[in-house]
Amino acid sequence: MDYQIIPLEIGSIVERHVFQSSNKEIKCGVVWKLGSVLTQIKPTFTKSYDPKIGICIQDIPGGSIGKIFGGKKVIYFSDTVEEEEQEELTDIFYGSHKKYSKNYADVFHDFGWIEVGSESYIFGEIEVIEINKSANIYK
């Protein structure tokens, strides 16, 4: 049996990457408007699940992000990143900096930033449904 974990609120699935350089940090990624998490293992985390905290998708046995829609890129900086550097890194992240043709992660790496984490989360109220492989999956 397959299981689909569906957030009941828009924007409840996020993918986050964390980069560090000396005492500076960038958190960036995508907030998905709609989507779901799929697993072939019956979820047991729901008994202790806190919607305010959510759960890392990698902590759901067999869990992976299903179809996702309406992604919005977001980026946040620690207070130790100067404003001028924030502006340049923001332009690179959103792909609006004409000087760089590589993806943002490669450019950040070229600038000395090290990716220290990459995780996906689901939070908020959720519904878990059993699905049949031949049935249509929620979109």
Image: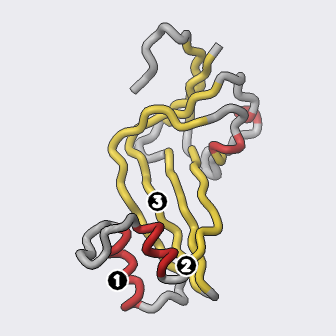
Residue 4, placed above or below residue 50: above
Kindly identify the amino acid type of the residue bearing the numbered disc 3: Gly
Query: Who is closer to the viewer here, 119 or 79?
Result: 119
Residue at 44% of width from left, 36% of height from top?
A: 35
Q: Residue 124 falls in which quadrant of the image?
A: top right
Neighbour class for label 2 at 10 Å: few (<14), some, many (≥20)?
Answer: some
Residues at badges 2 and 1 in contact (C-beta under 8 Å)? no
- Pointer 3: what residue? 29
Residue that label 1 marks: 87
Given the image, on which type of amino acid does mark 2 rest?
Answer: Trp
Which residue corresponds to the image point at 71% horizontal and 24% vertical from the top-left?
41
Secondary structure of the residue carrying numbered label 3: strand
Total labels drawn: 3
- Residue 57 place in picture, x, y as percent: 63, 43
Q: Quadrant of residue 96?
A: bottom left
* Residue under label 2: 113
- Whichever of callouts 3 and 1 sits on the residue coming sooner in the sequence is 3
* Alpha-carbon span between mark 2 and mark 1: 16 Å
Image position, residue 100 (x, y; %) = 31, 74
Are circles 3 and 1 on residues that touch, CB within 8 Å?
Answer: no
**Can you give x and y, in whole percent of width and height, for residue 93 in the image?**
37, 69
| Distance between the alpha carbons at the discs numbered 2 and 3 | 15 Å
Of badges 2 and 3, nearer the viewer stands 2
Q: Which structural element holds mark 1?
A: helix
* Secondary structure state at the residue bearing disc 2: loop
- How many C-alpha atoms fall within 10 Å of the one at disc 3: few (<14), some, or many (≥20)? many
Give the mark, 2 or 1, whose residue is nearer the N terminus: 1
Residue 44 falls in image quadrant: top right
How busy is the neighbourhood of tag 1: few (under 14 within 10 Å), some, or many (20 plus)? Answer: few
Please report the residue visible at 59 percent of the width from the left and 83 percent of the height from the top: 21
